[in-house]
Amino acid sequence: MASTNALLTQPTNFAAITPSDTTDLTATCNLGILVGGAGNLVIQGVYDSVSTTIVATAGQYVPGRFKRVMAATTATGLVACSGGRKAA
């Protein structure tokens, strides 16, 4: 049986991501990013001012809290995963 804490951190909401150098993800990405198509994922963490590049594979889940997915990203089919609330 899964612990209650594990249930609290599972994604419950999903939204498509359009990479941008100027638009923040806001609250739509508080658990991670799901990558549909392989490529470079250029991201900024919530508290970062510089970007980091990750070579991502198709189907990879990248956990973390992200502020922005940069326009230089070549990975496709990006999905922001958020939520974390236990179902009532």
Image (cartoon, rainbow, N blue to C red):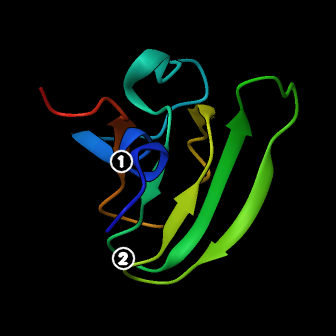
Percent x, y of residue 22: 58, 18
Q: Residues within 10 Å of mark 2 (few under 14, many from 20)?
A: some
User: Residue pushed farthest front?
Assistant: 1
Residue that label 1 marks? 7
Q: Residue 1: in sight, yes or no?
A: yes
- The residue sitting at 58% across, 55% down in the picture is 63
Left or right: where does residue 12 sit relative to residue 38?
Answer: left
Foreground: 10 or 60?
10
Quick one: quadrant of the C terminus? top left
The answer to which image quadrant residue 17 occupies is: top left
Q: What is the secondary structure assignment of the residue under circle 2?
A: loop
Q: Residues within 10 Å of mark 1 (few under 14, many from 20)?
A: few
Q: Amino acid at mark 2?
A: Gly
The answer to which image quadrant residue 47 occupies is: top right
Residue that label 2 marks? 37
Percent x, y of residue 37: 36, 76
Vertical arrangement, residue 55 with respect to residue 24, above or below: below
- The residue sitting at 71% across, 67% down in the picture is 54
- The residue sitting at 46% across, 40% down in the picture is 19
